[in-house]
Image (cartoon, rainbow, N blue to C red):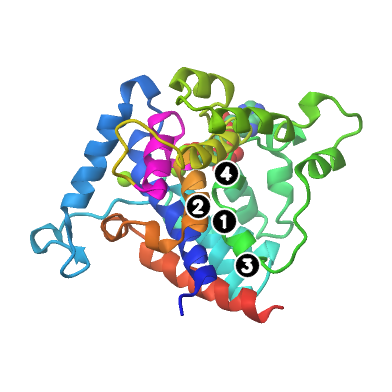
Amino acid sequence: SKNVLLSKFKGALVGAVLGDCIGSEFEGLWAKSIGVEKVLKSIGKLESEYDPATDGRKADKQDMLLRDYTDDTAMARSVAQSLIENKGFDAKHMAKMFSEEYFKDPYRGYGGSIITVFSKLKDAEFADPYKPAAEQFDGEGSYGNGGAMRIVPAPLFAYRQNDVQHLTLIEAKSKREATPFDFPYASITDDIRKYALQDDLPSTEEITGNLGTDISAYRSVPTAVYSFLRASKHIDKLEDRNSFEKTIIYAITLGGDTDTIATMAGAIAGAWYGIEAIPKSWQASCESVEDALKFAEQLYELSSTSE
Ligand code: R7I
Ligand code: MG
Ligand code: MG
Ligand code: MG
C-alpha cells in the first residue's frame, strides 16, 4: 500500500530543494523582467535533458552540471542532518553544522548579515549558540527570511508532537501591547485568503506591492503561502502543468527573492501533493535531491518511532 505520509515528507524536502535550484536563476530580478515564458523556457531546458527510459539525464547530457542549490538548501540540509544525527534538537551541534558548512562552501549566496553569525559562532567555539544571532541588528535580531527557508525538516521531525499553536497566540506572546503591527503574520492572512480565492489572477504588481517578494520574512513568507494556494486554481499559460509545478513556476514569476519564495512554496506544495506530483525530470537535474529523499526517509523513521 502507498505510504501517503512518507510521500509527503519526501515532497516537502524535494519541493524545497527544487524551488531553490530552479528559482535561484532569477533571484533579485524584477517580475517585469522575468515573465512566465522565461521561467517555462528554463524549465523546458531542464526537462529536455531527461531520459524517462533510464530515469536520469540523457547520455549526452550527463556531463552537464546539475543545477546547484544555494544557502536555502545548504542550511536546510544542516537542520535535517543535525536532527537526524542527534535524534532531536541540539542547538550547539546545529550551529556548528551551519557554520562549518558555510566555511567549507561559502559561495552559496548567503544573506549579507548571517555570515557574521557564522564567524562569531566559530570564534567562540559554539559556546553560546544563540548569542551571535541575538546580537544582530543592535540586539533586535535579523528579520531575514532565512529562518523560514531552512525550517522544513523541523516540522517533519516533530510531526507527531501536536504542539502547533495559533498564529495570533504565538505573536501575542512576544508583545506587550497589541496593535495590528504586532501581529504581522496574523494580520496578513486576510489578504492571502482574498488573493488566493479571487477568480481572476491578481496582478503581479498587486502581489509584489501588498505581499512582497523581498528578503524579509514578513514580506516573503505570506507570498509563498499565497503562491501555493493560488496554484490550485487556473493560471494562464500553465494549463498543462500540475499544481506542484504551477506553484514553483508562479512563485518565480513574482520576482525578487525567487529562490527563497519558491523554496518555501515548493515545500508546502510538495507536502500537500506528495512526491508523485514532482516531475522526475526536475528531480534528475538538481543537486541534493537524492539527499533530500534520504533525509525524508530518516525523518519519517524518527517521527514514527518517537510516538
Ligand atoms: O535571513 P538570511 O539567512 O537571508 C536569507 C536570504 C535568502 O534570500 C537567501 O536566498 C539569501 O539570499 O539570503 O540572512 P540575514 O543576513 O540575516 O538577512 C538578510 C538581509 O536582510 C540582511 O543582510 C539585511 O540586509 C536584511 N536585514 C535587516 N536589515 C535591517 N535591519 C535583516 N534584518 C534586518 C534588520 O533588522
Ligand atoms: Mg551557481
Ligand atoms: Mg539562496
Ligand atoms: Mg533568496
Q: Residue at x 72, y 78 (%)?
A: 307
Q: Amino acid at mark 1?
A: Val
Pointers 2 and 1 in contact (C-beta within 8 Å): yes
Q: Secondary structure at mark 4?
A: helix
Q: Amino acid at mark 3?
A: Phe
**Residue 120 image point, x, y percent:** 64, 48
Q: Amino acid at mark 4?
A: Gly
How far apart are labels 1 and 3 at the CA level?
A: 9 Å
Q: Report the residue marked by disc 1.
A: 152
> Toward the viewer: 9 or 193?
193
**Residue 35 image point, x, y percent:** 32, 26
In the displayed structure image, the side of residue 197 where residue 252 appears, left or right? left
**Residue 74 image point, x, y percent:** 47, 55
Pointers 3 and 4 in contact (C-beta within 8 Å): no
Label 4 near ligand 1 (CB < 8 Å): yes
| Residue count near mark 4 (Cα–Cα under 10 Å), binned few <14, some 14–19, many ≥20 | many
| Magenta span contains residue 171 | no
Q: Secondary structure at mark 1?
A: loop
